[in-house]
Amino acid sequence: MGVFSTRQKTGQASSLPRHVAVIMDGNGRWAQKRGLPRTAGHKAGAENFRTIATYCKDIGIEYLTAYAFSTENWKRPQSEVDAIMGLLDEYLHESIETMARDNIRLRFLGDTSVLSPRLRALIDETDELTRHITGFQANICLNYGGRDELVRAAKAFACDCVEGKCAPEDLTEAKFPEYLWSSGLPDPELLIRPGGELRMSNFLLWQCAYSEIYVTDTLWPDFGTDELDRALVWYQTRDRRFGGLSEKK
């Protein structure tokens, strides 16, 4: 367990983000470095997500959103895609038994319509069992792409205009998020990118407009609670100005 769990109890932790987003990158590289199949890396990454999600809940973070499978990931070898979907199936079976008990809501963001009927049924069951939970919420971006999300949102608003529910001039920065997969969620204050890559990878393009971005070379399966603590300490040093001037000046 990292440093924040202890400090939270004594009231010393401050300025924690409400919402942390993470690009779970490096699973394949982690496995290859160990002479293992890439699927072993995805399994290790899935287990680490559970660890990090539990830790976030314990220290008082309200939301954790993880990039699990993008709209572009279908281009990967079919064996790898099948392994990832199998891990999701396994994770959901376990989650259905533990989420409500642990007061964790699990929500999926993305186009799940293309998934197998079995997975869609598990997702619906998980959502039904945990939707009443008002504590910590873990969001899994599955078959998700930031550009796809924006196009879908624009189309949905256009349809509402055609149906007379609203007019084009009604669209504002405050209203547009209602049409996103993430509707109802606060924007992430902190975006964590393990694996050392310096790109957004089509993840939460609208939501992360003003997120603080923490990049580390640590691969996702090795990104433990101590690594998360380092990211949170770094976040607390940031002067978040949102385009304005620092209040310190």
Image (cartoon, rainbow, N blue to C red):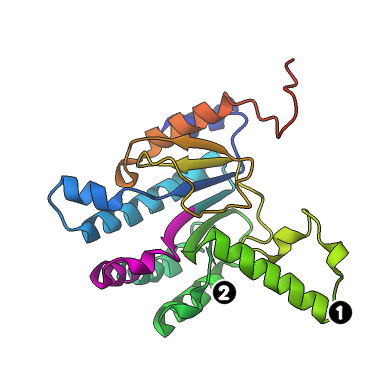
Q: Counting residues from the N terminus, which is met first, the one under dot 2 or under dot 1?
A: 2
- Residue drawn at (59%, 35%) of the image: 16
Label 2 neighbourhood size at 10 Å, few (<14), some (14-19), many (20+)?
some
Instruction: Residue 84: name its quadrant.
Output: bottom left
- Residue drawn at (39%, 50%) of the image: 24
Q: Is residue 104 magenta?
A: no
Query: Which numbered disc covers residue 164?
Result: 1
44 sits left or right of 164 in the view: left
The image position of residue 69, as x and y in percent, is 41, 62
Could you say whether the residue bearing mark 1 is in a helix, strand or loop? Answer: loop
- Residue drawn at (51%, 64%) of the image: 100
Residue range of the region highlighted in magenta in the rendering: 66-85
Q: Is residue 70 magenta?
A: yes
Visible residue check, residue 1:
no
Q: Are marks 2 and 1 in contact (CB under 8 Å)?
A: no
The image position of residue 54, as x and y in percent, is 45, 49
Which residue is nearer to you in this view: 6 or 53? 53
Query: Which numbered disc covers residue 59?
Result: none
60 sits left or right of 198 in the view: right
- In 3D space, how far apart are the residues under numbered discs 2 and 1 (Cα atoms)? 31 Å
In front of the other: label 2 or label 1? 1
Instruction: Residue 190: name its quadrant.
Output: top right
The image position of residue 163, as x and y in percent, is 82, 82
Identity of the amino acid at label 2?
A: Glu
Which residue is identified by label 2? 128
Residue furthest bottom as drawn: 117
